[in-house]
């Protein structure tokens, strides 16, 4: 996440409800019969934002609340938790009625005010400027009836040209919503989902200074309530939960139920088990303390839990005291859905075409030589497509089923792989090669006819000139010289905590960053384009240097000049010529814990084809 200045906004004074016609005594400030009647986008009572419109009695409740115990469409428990019928839009609107405050999820500061009436009319005010617009909001079960837990909203505003400088005067947004009730506070979470953003996302609800694109599409609205308690924590259990809020007490968790279905990536047809998380049976949330030795290895960015309102789904484990002993992120997929785990991919092949889950690919589409596909083997996210070329050679295409693209094509025979695709070997005639096409071994014969990996040894079977008897040679199994590069490429191709932890297996303790110089092009298709080190003086160099941050919030410099802030797994790149002699430039990485690490740009290895190094303690 590129770090940008976030301007925090403080709301001075008390911002009160607009256009009130009475109090129905629901829960705290949500107990308002709110109407928005005027047609000019203004409201006489609302013009005086500093007036206190809360008439409270000595016990902190509204006077009318003492006479009217509740809204007829809502049931309120003794502790104040409201029961909502998600099959009734009026029930949801009755709960949502009142004034909500749009809040920066990172800082917790409010910068917008949303007034919702019981008939679905609403008004939004941007607090820093006072700009406002009127519109409507609807709640229903959404666009996908097979995902019953995906609760859906639609919102539309008008008057956007004058108030917010939009190109169009009317805009709408839609997506999923989630309601949370905790002691003292209600939450209304909405997420815009679809293929593109709306004017509401980019101009109306946007943060004063955008810190992260993802936050542009997700918003949290809060308000005070009269809930006195929401029950006990769940003990000695494993469950899914949304981390709603963080604070001195720990983490506010709302239990959610996974609603699962098999899904395909809409772009590549990769098959996985999808889920949305339904809160309708768990409308309340509890504060959980976190054990001092809790397992956090399942979290990619620990800084997410530093946010006031993380709004992320986790797998949670608790002990017999109800303390959190483990948190593991659930991977977001698309359109409000999450990926729980990949499924078996359905593969067929015929002639020179292969089909993955109904999507057909031709070897010719990728300029791959082969007159007939002989076999297809799935290996993790990869499909290894073996095709015949001639009696002494085949082609082996390593097709990434998740990205929908061939990452590498190997021409040879007897392709074998170990634990990873890059831990692989093949032969051509009398020579064995590794994944990077380096020569591993040459036999004293005519042609190799078999390769196998047994323990840490490479067994080679071959013929001599008479092609009569099979001979065998055994050598130590070579290691992939650039395995850290490929492990990082796997993370970049599918960024989640599992692929990150696989990459960490290659990271030495105390390292601050990884440097890569000219990594193999097969694995750089989604890397950043490099910046020239000094365009005016040097132009673009002959080499590309990547810097990979290993910590959230690391600052990367070139000669203490312009810098970038990178979170773990993010990269920046420079175009420079790596000198054979004395270094002319230095890369500096400052980690958040105050360590400074330097790497003078130089040749990493003059002997072997090693293209990476780690810097730091």
Image (cartoon, helix red, strand yellow):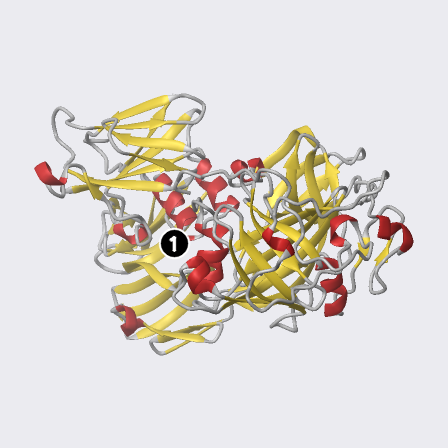
Quadrant showing the N terminus = top left
The residue where tag 1 is placed is 416
Whether residue 338 is visible here, answered yes or no, is no
Image coordinates for residue 367, horizontal then vertical, percent? 25, 69
**Above-or-below relation of 439 to 170:** above
Quadrant showing the C terminus = top left
Element type at marker 1? strand
On screen, residue 286 versus residue 206, left or right, reads right
On screen, residue 142 versus residue 198, left or right, reads right
- Mark 1 neighbour class, 10 Å CA radius: few under 14, some 14 to 19, many 20 or more: some
Whether residue 148 is visible here, answered yes or no, is yes
Foreground residue among 85 and 616: 85
Residue at x-position 42% and y-position 64%: 161
Image coordinates for residue 417, horizontal then vertical, percent? 40, 51
Q: Quadrant of residue 539?
A: top left
Q: Quadrant of residue 327?
A: top right
**Above-or-below relation of 512 to 378:** above
On screen, residue 98 versus residue 62, left or right, reads left
């Amino acid at each position: 996440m590129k770090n940008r200045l976030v301007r925090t906004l403080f709301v001075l004074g008390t911002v009160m409800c607009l256009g009130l016609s009475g109090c129905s005594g629901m829960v705290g400030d949500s107990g308002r019969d709110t109407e928005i009647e005027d047609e000019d986008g203004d409201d006489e009572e609302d013009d005086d934002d500093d007036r206190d419109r809360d008439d409270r009695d000595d016990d902190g409740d509204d006077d009318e609340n003492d006479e009217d115990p509740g809204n007829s469409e809502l049931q309120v428990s003794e502790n104040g938790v409201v029961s909502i019928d998600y099959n009734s839009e009026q029930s949801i609107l009755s709960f949502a009625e009142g004034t909500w405050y749009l809040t920066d999820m990172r800082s917790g500061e409010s910068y917008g005010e949303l007034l919702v009436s019981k008939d679905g009319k609403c008004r939004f005010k941007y607090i820093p400027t006072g700009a406002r617009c009127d519109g409507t909001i609807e709640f229903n079960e959404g666009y996908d009836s097979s995902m019953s837990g995906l609760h859906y909203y639609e919102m539309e505003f008008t008057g956007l040209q004058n108030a917010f400088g939009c190109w169009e005067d009317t805009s709408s947004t839609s997506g999923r919503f989630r309601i949370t009730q905790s002691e003292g506070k209600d939450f209304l979470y909405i997420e815009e989902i679809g293929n593109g953003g709306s004017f509401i996302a980019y101009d109306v609800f946007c943060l004063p200074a955008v810190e992260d694109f993802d936050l542009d599409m997700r918003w949290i609205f809060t308000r005070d309530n009269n809930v006195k308690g929401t029950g006990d924590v769940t003990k000695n259990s494993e469950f899914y939960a949304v981390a709603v809020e963080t604070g001195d007490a720990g983490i506010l968790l709302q239990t959610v139920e996974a609603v699962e279905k098999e899904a395909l990536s809409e772009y590549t047809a990769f098959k996985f088990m999808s889920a949305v998380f339904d809160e309708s049976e768990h409308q309340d949330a509890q504060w959980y303390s976190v054990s001092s030795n809790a397992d956090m290895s399942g979290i990619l960015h620990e800084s997410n839990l530093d946010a006031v309102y993380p709004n992320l789904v986790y797998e949670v484990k608790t002990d017999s005291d109800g303390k959190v002993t483990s948190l593991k992120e659930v991977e977001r997929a698309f359109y409000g859905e999450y990926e729980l785990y990949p499924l078996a991919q359905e593969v067929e092949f015929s002639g020179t075409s292969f089909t993955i889950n109904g999507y057909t690919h031709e070897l010719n589409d990728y300029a791959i030589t082969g007159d007939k596909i002989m076999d297809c083997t799935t290996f993790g996210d990869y499909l290894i497509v073996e095709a015949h070329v001639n009696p002494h050679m085949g082609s082996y295409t390593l097709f990434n089923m998740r990205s929908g693209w061939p990452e590498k094509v190997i021409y040879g025979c007897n392709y074998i792989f170990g634990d990873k695709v890059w831990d692989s070997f093949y032969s051509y005639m009398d020579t064995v090669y590794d994944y990077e096409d380096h020569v591993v071994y040459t036999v004293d014969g005519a042609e190799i006819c078999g390769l196998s990996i047994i323990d840490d040894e490479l067994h080679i079977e071959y013929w001599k000139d008479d092609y009569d008897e099979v001979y065998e040679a055994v050598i130590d199994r070579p290691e992939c010289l650039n395995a850290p590069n490929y492990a990082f490429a796997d993370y970049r191709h599918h960024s989640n905590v599992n692929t990150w932890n696989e990459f960490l297996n290659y990271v030495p303790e105390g390292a601050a960053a990884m440097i890569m110089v000219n990594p193999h092009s097969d694995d750089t298709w989604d890397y950043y384009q490099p910046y020239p080190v000094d365009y005016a003086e040097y132009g673009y160099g002959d080499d590309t240097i990547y810097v990979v941050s290993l910590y959230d919030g690391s600052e990367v410099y070139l000669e203490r000049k312009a810098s970038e802030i990178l979170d773990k797994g993010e990269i920046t790149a420079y175009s420079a010529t790596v000198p054979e002699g004395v270094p002319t430039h230095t890369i500096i990485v400052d980690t958040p814990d105050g360590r400074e690490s330097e790497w003078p740009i130089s040749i990493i290895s003059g002997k072997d084809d090693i293209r990476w190094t780690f810097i730091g303690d």
